[in-house]
Amino acid sequence: MADLFVRPYDQQRKSPMRLITTALVVIVITILVVAVLIGLERKPSPDSELVPADQAGDVPALAEPMSFSGSSGTSSGSSTGADGSAQQMFARAQSLIAAGNLEQARELLYQVVATATEESMRNNALRVLGRINLQLFISPTPMAEKKSYVIQPGDSLDKIARQNKTTVELIRKMNTIDGNVIYPGRRLLIPANPFVLLVDKSSRTVDLTMGGKLMKRYVVGLGVHGKTPVGNFVTVVHQTNPDWTQPGGGIIPFGDPRNILGTRWMSIQDATRPDIKGFGIHGTPLRDSIGAETSNGCVRMLNEEVEELYLLIPRGTEVIISE
């Protein structure tokens, strides 16, 4: 019986009160630990903070009406009045675009541009409007800015383009024509009116207009220290992949990194002021120069945008430059 435990005679039994005190201490400590753990769970961790808008993941464009921030940096998501109505129209236009109804969407966007007082909202509408307008215009889709033309005997694409102040390539794209062969009696869609370019030096923008209606707005670079001339001009020389003649002399060929003209060049001229020369509209690979005064006086555009404009406007297009 060596494994039998026998309490020594002189060992005192523990007091019941001592056992109760110990139990209470354990209970109190347990309650405190649980309370601390619960507090830690309720405290937001750094990772649970709201993600800045520019770091957020992709959000479906039409899931919620888009909200805009004004110059004060406050959201207008709960705004009322003109901007509240404009925001609702913008959201509705987004839904129409997603459904493929571009014609109704663009009419709503025109209303947003006309009624919105908040600059960010208006600029968003302008960007989407320009994209839709040109998508519809450079396609076989009928719209108010196009008219029907019946090909006559002896017509050519070049003749039709010159008579209607447009470009051959635009007629091809609007009517899905490959090459130059056309047949008398066939109907073509052509621009209803000539385009006019409005250059605003204060906002550094170019508005592509037709019949007084805005089709698309481009942000551009202009001349340093206000060197871009003001007045009424027409485009004269249209060139693809242009060489650049430096102001001090010497020709830099297209493709040379020093050539600042980009992929397209359209010179402008005022016949009443022959002393104003050497100015034009051209592309640039220097994307950071757009929206600033960076050129020697020319209107500088992104290459992809000047190529788009080059497709749309023929020689002789009116260019109005204002302060």
Image (cartoon, helix red, strand yellow):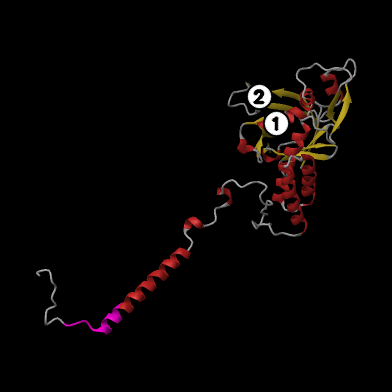
**Quadrant of the snapshot with the N terminus:** bottom left
Of residues 321 and 171, the one drawn nearer to the viewer in this rendering: 171
Q: Position of residue 130 (x, y in %)?
A: 74, 39
Q: Secondary structure at mark 2?
A: strand
Q: Callout 2: 10 Å neighbours few (<14), some, many (20+)?
A: some
Rendered residue at 87%/28% (across/down) = 148
Location of residue 31 (image quadrant): bottom left
Q: Amino acid at mark 1?
A: Val
Residue 319: image x %, image y %? 79, 34
Residue in the picture at 88% in, 25% down: 149
**Amino acid type at image mark 2:** Trp
* Nearer to the camera, 46 or 99: 99
> Which residue: 23% across, 84% down?
15
Quadrant that contains the C terminus: top right
User: Which mark is in front, 1 or 2?
Assistant: 1
Q: Nearer the viewer, residue 81 or 317?
A: 81
Q: Residue furthest front?
A: 1
**Residue at which label 1 appears:** 306
Q: Nearer the viewer, residue 286 or 116?
A: 116
- The residue range painted magenta reads 12-22
The answer to whether residue 114 is left or right of residue 293 is right
Q: Which residue is mark 2?
A: 244
Residue sitting at the far left? 2
Residue 15 in the magenta stretch? The answer is yes
Residue 91, horizontal then vertical, whole percent = 72, 49
